[in-house]
Amino acid sequence: MRVQPSPSVGPDLTIDNPVLGEYDKNHDGKLDAKEVASMADDLRHERNNNKLLKRIVITFIVFAMLLVGAMTGLVWAITLHLKETEVSSSGMFISRETGLPVLVSSADTAVVDGVMMARSSAGAIQTPVQVATSTVPAKLSSMMPMEALKELKTLQITSNTGAQISLVVQAVAKIPAPFDGQYTSCEVLKIVTFVGTISVYGEQLLFEPSAHSLFVEAGFAVDNSGRRLLGMYDVIGFFNLSHPEYCGDHQLHSGGWPQTPPSNKL
């Protein structure tokens, strides 16, 4: 309801503010009762607009929060629904469908009837997996340290005529050489095999009579004593070492192994 001014209202208000000048309809420089009533109506209208705007802003904020919460819940529900595995109370990944632990398959190998088989780049199963040798060959000498000799697995003897013998090593020992003039080093290497004990002094080889027939049948030339080889031959040891250039803390010399000074215990 608009307020009707009365002609008997008190004296008019003098305008001293540019904003109030907008309500001076008759441009007399003063606000009469009618013009003051118009200003009050505008003020009441602006207050109502501010209240409406606040309600709209609050409604928008609440709606935005509800929308974000609904989207978060929807994403979480979809993630749980599509998730194929979960962590059990024991800490294992298990399948949501079967409840069994998750099995991981190798991209390079597969087990078929207890045999590990290699896979091709296309995933097809091909041949059984082969294991590479883990031994390192080196020329055998009684001057080798025990750090290397403890890793000796196989002894191979080859002559210049093509005869070969390969023996599995059962035990190794280094002992002082007897003072009888036939040894060329102060230490003798004793190698225990199935055919008997083989002695190495320096790079010379001596074997027990029980191994005589084996060397002869293999094509080696044996002297009259039946314990020594004649002609040129190589004695190669195969060692269980991962790095052939090192043996313990000793770096190999140009001949293949670190040489330790023999101790004369005669």
Image (cartoon, rainbow, N blue to C red):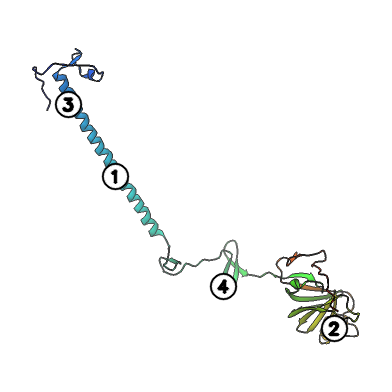
Quick one: label 4 or label 1, which is nearer the N terminus? 1
Mark 1 lies on residue: 63
Q: Residues within 10 Å of mark 4 (few under 14, many from 20)?
A: few
Mark 3 lies on residue: 41
Quick one: label 3 or label 2, which is nearer the N terminus? 3
Q: How many marks?
A: 4
Quarter occupied by residue 224: bottom right
Q: State which mark lies toward you, 3 or 2.
A: 3
Q: State which mark lies toward you, 4 or 2.
A: 2
Q: Say the numbered circle drawn on residue 163.
A: none
The secondary structure type at the circle numbered 3 is helix
Mark 2 lies on residue: 216
From the viewer's perspective, is residue 46 above or below residue 184?
above
3D distance between C-alphas at marks 4 and 2: 46 Å
Q: State which mark lies toward you, 1 or 3.
A: 3
Quick one: label 3 or label 4, which is nearer the N terminus? 3
Q: State which mark lies toward you, 2 or 1.
A: 1
